[in-house]
Image: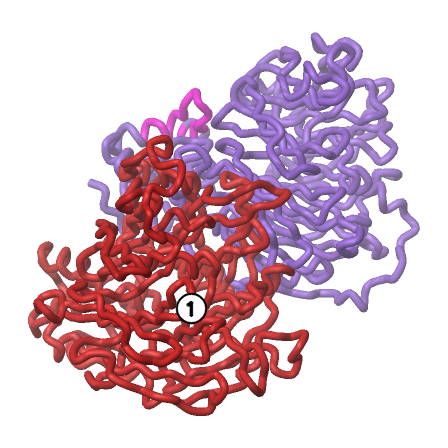
Chain colours: A red, B purple
Amino acid sequence: MTNLSEEEFLWAKQVYFERCAGCHGTLRKGATGPALTPDRTTAMGTTALSAIIFNGTPRGMPDWGKQGFFTPEQIDILARFLQQEPPAPPEMSLEQMKNSWRLLVSPAERPGAPATKRNWQNYFMVTLRDVGQVAVIDGDTYEVVSNVDTGYAVHITRMSATGRYAYVIGRDGKLALVDLWMETPTKVAEVQVCYDARSVEVSKYEGPEGDFTDRLAVVGCYWPPHFVILDGQTLEPMNIISTHGYTVDTKEYHPEPRVTSIVVSHYKPEWIINVKEIGQIWLVNYVDPFAPQIKMLRAARYLHDGGWDASRRYFLVAASQSNKVAVVDALEGKIAALVDTPKIPHPGREANWIDPEFGPVWSSAHLGDPAIVSIGTDPEGHAESAWKAVRVTPLPGAGSLFIKTHPNSQWIWVDMTLKPDPVLARTICVIAKQQPTELYRCWEASSYGRAVHFEYNAAGTEVWVSIWGDASKPGQTGEIVVYDDATLTEKAHIPNLITPTGKFNVFNTVGDIY
Amino acid sequence: MTNLSEEEFLWAKQVYFERCAGCHGTLRKGATGPALTPDRTTAMGTTALSAIIFNGTPRGMPDWGKQGFFTPEQIDILARFLQQEPPAPPEMSLEQMKNSWRLLVSPAERPGAPATKRNWQNYFMVTLRDVGQVAVIDGDTYEVVSNVDTGYAVHITRMSATGRYAYVIGRDGKLALVDLWMETPTKVAEVQVCYDARSVEVSKYEGPEGDFTDRLAVVGCYWPPHFVILDGQTLEPMNIISTHGYTVDTKEYHPEPRVTSIVVSHYKPEWIINVKEIGQIWLVNYVDPFAPQIKMLRAARYLHDGGWDASRRYFLVAASQSNKVAVVDALEGKIAALVDTPKIPHPGREANWIDPEFGPVWSSAHLGDPAIVSIGTDPEGHAESAWKAVRVTPLPGAGSLFIKTHPNSQWIWVDMTLKPDPVLARTICVIAKQQPTELYRCWEASSYGRAVHFEYNAAGTEVWVSIWGDASKPGQTGEIVVYDDATLTEKAHIPNLITPTGKFNVFNTVGDIY
């Protein structure tokens, strides 16, 4: 019996979109999680589906019932919903985007030079995850300069080429533009270009083909499966490019190829856009945003997040389903390598450093494996190590989300955010670059919550760690702990932040320093 | 009452695909014909829909009932079918394509030099529309050298860069490869890469980026909306690129952007691919067929067929819904102009000639207008005429499909194939290039059928005209009439062909001479 009342159906549709679509896909074709199309779900039946939703699986499905997110009755509704055809999600036209567009402060009304005396290039844009805001925090004084309303559950912030503008993308597809030259950093424009989004990037090229400094932005969407090019000064949407296509391996049509990470070249007028489900990496030349030129490289499924190597010639991106890291040679415009790695690489931008044995490497955390994996990135100086997983540094357990270092630092920092043990979840560790076979030290970063994500200050002398608390528990909503990088000692607390997660230093984000 | 039995539904679905989808779209979003989505069709109701299907419309809808194609009962089924949601048409994966692929004679088994003594570069590939064949006809002797089984209702044939290979695409998406070097031209490979197709093209580039002579083929599909790159020697499908995207003007998502015409650059490793419903022209660099680079130019809806100007730098393509001709500058990789024209331009490759007043022009026939329209194509020598409709030469009535000329000829030939008057439908006319204000002469090309499509021989001294007869009427199934171009007198008949339509001379097709 899979019939649902209209009320049940609408509830399940919304819950599926918020909680399930990220892993299983809006059209339920599967990605990080398995496909949930009716041919599979009806064969399983309501009871088996309900049990999985309640108890989770070792593969990574959360135990929604055990955790108390849903009652057994609600889980029964979800299980029945999953046996029906997925409802067709809505498309979004340019007109809809434009209807949502608000130019709050026009470029002419904005300051012509920094109107603040603060060292704005050392600002940190801090995601306050559960309140739909970013906090702009002064990296010199640790003061919260401004709280800016943004989209919900902000995924990332990126800076314009000069660093003056911050582009904040919510998971709800809402993009906010914040002007950091104002005395109080203020949202100067906003627009919604998707129902579900993960990435935003800017244009940085200046050279013979034009000056694109602070000119363009691009948003990568989960649904609809497309990316949108916008005016970087106003957020007026300019062009929409669909990512529908054929999978890289079996060449089957996929109705929902989602855009995960986007990075921008430092040397060419080009974005590198990762299209998850089809396993393609698109090199998008943005010189003419109305007639972009796209080179469609073949990588592997399912492309996730990634970062540049230290030279910023090579971009490394995780292909989670394939247990590979794809390496794009952005100079030559081709795939340089597909590197085999342990299970489920889950990088953010990750960490570049000089391994004493293998030379320049790029290291990533692994969701499915208790280890940090380092890949050689110097084909000219260390050809034998290049594009190979040359080192595995063991961790106490799987569940790391982020690692971080800085060219000036002797350390690599790593979190263990998703460990079930609450003590380990708030524990952070460092590895010494000179002794990378083992952890150098681990400690609890707080007495509550989970420790997540690192960011350096502009000078590369401090490390900021988020304590991800509970928005409903005053005193334990969250905070940031600031460490002296040289001594690993606590230097400051920025208290009473509501669920802080990602932090983006203006200077380091502009320069892709990690 | 719109319910249909399963048998009625399947019948209507098949009829819709064969007879209606070409104009209204497989998903019924509309193109040449209006949209037929349930929101519109249910408002009209069964009676009004049936009346239109029976009687046709002045806008171009055929009178299927009056012509006796369908009974009133069948029309009632179709009218009810149209009020239901369009059934989702099937996708096609690379595996399915490969399953249909037959390599009948491997490249190694084919002759290393022409095995025929005939002048194969003057062969004509003649579509025998209603029998799913092409006839290979010797242009020197008028003999039918070979009848080759191909896809159904062949749309066009294109030649490889050397002319040795002919690529024949059926409307059913079946591609046949014919080797003209064999003593008897023979199908050496076949494959199906769509359910509905219109175009095929080859690779011609030879230069610093590689030698692509006779190397690749590309098929443009109506359904699924994609194009497919194939090995030009074997027809093994290599890559599929989806054309799903956003319309050029309103930037709404379109689920069925069909590929109409494709031409290949003579100077670059590039195809120019016209994506009808979204009004975009894609410049596809084929140097790496597995990672093609695509520049998406904005033109206008709905892109149809087109041809090169005499210099082969500019490609002109009809945008039927917009009453425009888009001009692509293939050298610069951009839109050079959007030219306003009278109603519904319907070019084939069309005709390039020197107008005594306006210099080099490209002329096209117009379905919706009793005229030939000439557009200036020489921005350097005749800037004031360039990319303007500079001349309209009146015709006795609308309904022309094709015009043709040759650089050596003093004439422009024009048919009137779709005129309802049977005498006019088999009448052809010529215009003298030195007196282009009026028709020079018109005459009946046969005593039955419709006259359609012209092609020159390799020397440019003869014009071949198809008489499109009735496959069920022996003696009147069709023929080709060969004229001496200098004198406009009949020179030969090639009789007893079954519904001949398009004719493609090897030499002229390789060189894009028209």
Give B177 or A248, whichever is nearer the viewer: A248
Q: Give the left or right position of residue A114, taking residue B504 as reference.
A: left
Q: Give the left or right position of residue A73, taking residue B59 as reference.
A: left
- The residue segment tinted magenta is B50-65
Looking at the rendering, which quadrant does residue A142 occupy? bottom left
Q: How many marks?
A: 1
Residue neighbourhood size for the residue with mark 1, other residues' Cα within 10 Å, grouped as few (<14), some (14–19), many (≥20): some
Looking at the rendering, which quadrant does residue B455 occupy? top right
Q: Give the left or right position of residue B448, taking residue B143 as reference.
A: left
- The residue depicted at 43 percent of the width and 38 percent of the height is B247
Where in the figure is residue A166, as x and y percent of width and height? 36, 50
Q: Give the left or right position of residue B204, taking residue B402 as reference.
A: right
Can you see residue B380?
yes
Where in the figure is residue B281, as x and y percent of width and height? 56, 39
Give A273 or A363, whichever is nearer the viewer: A363
- Furthest-right residue in this view: B117
- Which amino acid does the dot numbered 1 rest on? Gly
Q: Is residue B464 above or below residue B283?
A: above
Q: Is residue A423 above or below residue A28?
A: below
Q: Is residue A438 above or below residue A376?
A: below
Quadrant (top left/top right/bottom left/bottom right) for the C terminus of chain A: bottom left
Q: Which residue is mark 1?
A: A460
Where in the figure is residue B38, as x and y percent of width and height? 28, 39
Where in the figure is residue A80, as x and y percent of width and height? 16, 68
- The residue depicted at 50 percent of the width and 81 percent of the height is A374
